[in-house]
Image (cartoon, rainbow, N blue to C red):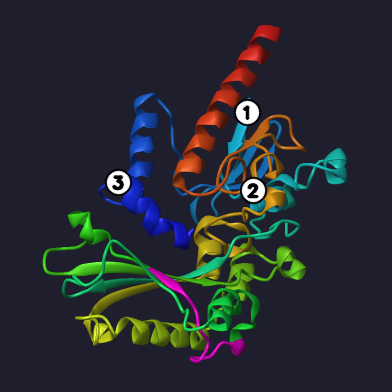
C-alpha cells in the first residue's frame, strides 16, 4: 500500500473529508437521526444473540436486554465472535448462558485469523507550520536490500525488547493541514506518525479477567521504554528535513496510540486498526462473510469482513449489509 500511495495520488488525486474522517461518522449520525434512529451513547453491548443484545449502562450501570428482529454488529469480527457471540451460541446456549456471563465485559478475540500489521501512532500538535512536509510522506529504510527487508519485518516479528536504535524501520507521516486548514490553528500544525509494528499476542488466560484488567495487561506488551526509543528514532529521521531539526521542542501536545490503546478504544482483535490481513486466504470470497455462521439473525460489518479494510471498502460493505438486512426483513414479513 505504501508503494502504491504516491503513484495513485498523482494519477487520481486524493479525496479526504474536510474536518477529518470523524466528519464522515458525524454525517452518518445526522442522517440516521433525521430518519428517526435512536442512538444510545455511553452504553456497552456485552452479549449478542438471535433475539437481541444485552447492554450495560454508563459506569457499570444496570444491565438490560434489548430485543431485535435483526442485529448488525460493527464491532471487529474476531472480537465479536469471541467476546459477544460465543456467550450465546454453541453448547452453552442449550442451557442459556448465565446472567453473570451475559453482562460481564471481557476482551478476547479469535486468533485463528491472520491479522494486518499493528501500529504505533504519534499524534503531535506543533507550535509552528511544518511546510517541508506534504500531506502524505513515507520514510523508508532502503540503504541495501537486506536493510529494506529487515525494515519491514523487524518490528512485526521481533520481541519489542530486541528492537534498538540501530534497527531499520519504515514509517508514514500525515500532515492533514496541508490540504485541510481546519486540522490546526493558524501558525501551528498537526501531524500523525504511523509506525508499523507487531500486533498484540493473545493470552487465553486474559479472557477470564474483567475487561479493564485484560486491557492493562495487553497494553503492557508495548512498554514505555519501547515507545520512547521508537519516538527518539522517528524524531532523528525527521530532523534531516528543513525546519524539523528541533521538532521535539516544538511539540506542544502529544497523544500516543499502540495496539493496546486501539484494543481499548475500539475492541479490535489483536489491537490492529486495519482488521484482518488481505492474504489470499482472507481475500474476497475467502474473507469472513457478513452473515454470522452461528446466529441467523446477526450480520457483521467492518474492516475484518467482506469486502475488506480501508474506508472505501468498509463503506461499500456497509451498503451491502444494509441491503442484505432489508432483504432478510422483507422476506420475513412476506412469509408471515
Residue 70 is tagged as: 1
Spatial CA span between label 2 and label 3: 26 Å
Describe the element under mark 2 as helix, strand or loop: helix
Q: Position of residue 204 (x, y in %)?
A: 76, 67
Q: Residue at horizontal 64%, vertical 48%?
A: 77
Q: Are marks 2 and 3 in contact (CB under 8 Å)?
A: no
Magenta-span inclusion, residue 303? no
Q: In the rendered view, does 67 fall on the left or right side of 5?
A: right
Towards the viewer: 241 or 35: 241
Spatial CA span between label 3 and label 1: 31 Å
Describe the element under mark 1 as helix, strand or loop: loop
Tell me the residue that label 3 is attached to.
17
Q: Position of residue 115 (x, y in %)?
A: 64, 60
Towards the viewer: 329 or 57: 329
Q: Position of residue 93 (x, y in %)?
A: 82, 41
Q: How many marks?
A: 3
Tell me the residue that label 2 is attached to.
77
Magenta-span inclusion, residue 171? yes
Circle 3 crowding by C-alpha within 10 Å: few under 14, some 14–19, many from 20: few
Q: Position of residue 329 (x, y in %)?
A: 62, 19
- Single out the mark in the foreground, 3 or 1: 3
Let me know if residue 157 appears in the view: yes
Amino acid at each position: 500500500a505504501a508503494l502504491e500511495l504516491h503513484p495513485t495520488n498523482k494519477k487520481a488525486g486524493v479525496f479526504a473529508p474536510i474536518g477529518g474522517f470523524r466528519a464522515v461518522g458525524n454525517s452518518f449520525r445526522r442522517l440516521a437521526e433525521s430518519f428517526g434512529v435512536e442512538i444510545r451513547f455511553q452504553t456497552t453491548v456485552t452479549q449478542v444473540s438471535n433475539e437481541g443484545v444485552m447492554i450495560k449502562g454508563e459506569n457499570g450501570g444496570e444491565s438490560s436486554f434489548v430485543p431485535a428482529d435483526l442485529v448488525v454488529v460493527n464491532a471487529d469480527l474476531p472480537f465479536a465472535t469471541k467476546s459477544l457471540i460465543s456467550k450465546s451460541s454453541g453448547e452453552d446456549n442449550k442451557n442459556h448462558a448465565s446472567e453473570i456471563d451475559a453482562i460481564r465485559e471481557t476482551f478476547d478475540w479469535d486468533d485463528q485469523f491472520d491479522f494486518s500489521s499493528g501500529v504505533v501512532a504519534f499524534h503531535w500538535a506543533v507550535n509552528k507550520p511544518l511546510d517541508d512536509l506534504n500531506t502524505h510522506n513515507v520514510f523508508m529504510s532502503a540503504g541495501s536490500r537486506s536493510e529494506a527487508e529487515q525494515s519491514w519485518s523487524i518490528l512485526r516479528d521481533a520481541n519489542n525488547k530486541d528492537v534498538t536504535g540501530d534497527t531499520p524501520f519504515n514509517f508514514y507521516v500525515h500532515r492533514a493541514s496541508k490540504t485541510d486548514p481546519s486540522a490546526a490553528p493558524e501558525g501551528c500544525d498537526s501531524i500523525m506518525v504511523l509506525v508499523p509494528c507487531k500486533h498484540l499476542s493473545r493470552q487465553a488466560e486474559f479472557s477470564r479477567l474483567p475487561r479493564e484488567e485484560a486491557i492493562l495487561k495487553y497494553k503492557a506488551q508495548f512498554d514505555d521504554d519501547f515507545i520512547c526509543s521508537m519516538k527518539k528514532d522517528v524524531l532523528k529521521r525527521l530532523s534531516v528535513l528543513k525546519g524539523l531539526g528541533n521538532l521535539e521542542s516544538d511539540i506542544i501536545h502529544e497523544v500516543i496510540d499502540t495496539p493496546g490503546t486501539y484494543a481499548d478504544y475500539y475492541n479490535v482483535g489483536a489491537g490492529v486498526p486495519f482488521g484482518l490481513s488481505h492474504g489470499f486466504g482472507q481475500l474476497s470470497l475467502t474473507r469472513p462473510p457478513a452473515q454470522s455462521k452461528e446466529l441467523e439473525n446477526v450480520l457483521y460489518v467492518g474492516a475484518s469482513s467482506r469486502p475488506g479494510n480501508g474506508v472505501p471498502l468498509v463503506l461499500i460493505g456497509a451498503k451491502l449489509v444494509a441491503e442484505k438486512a432489508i432483504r432478510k426483513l422483507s422476506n420475513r414479513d412476506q412469509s408471515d
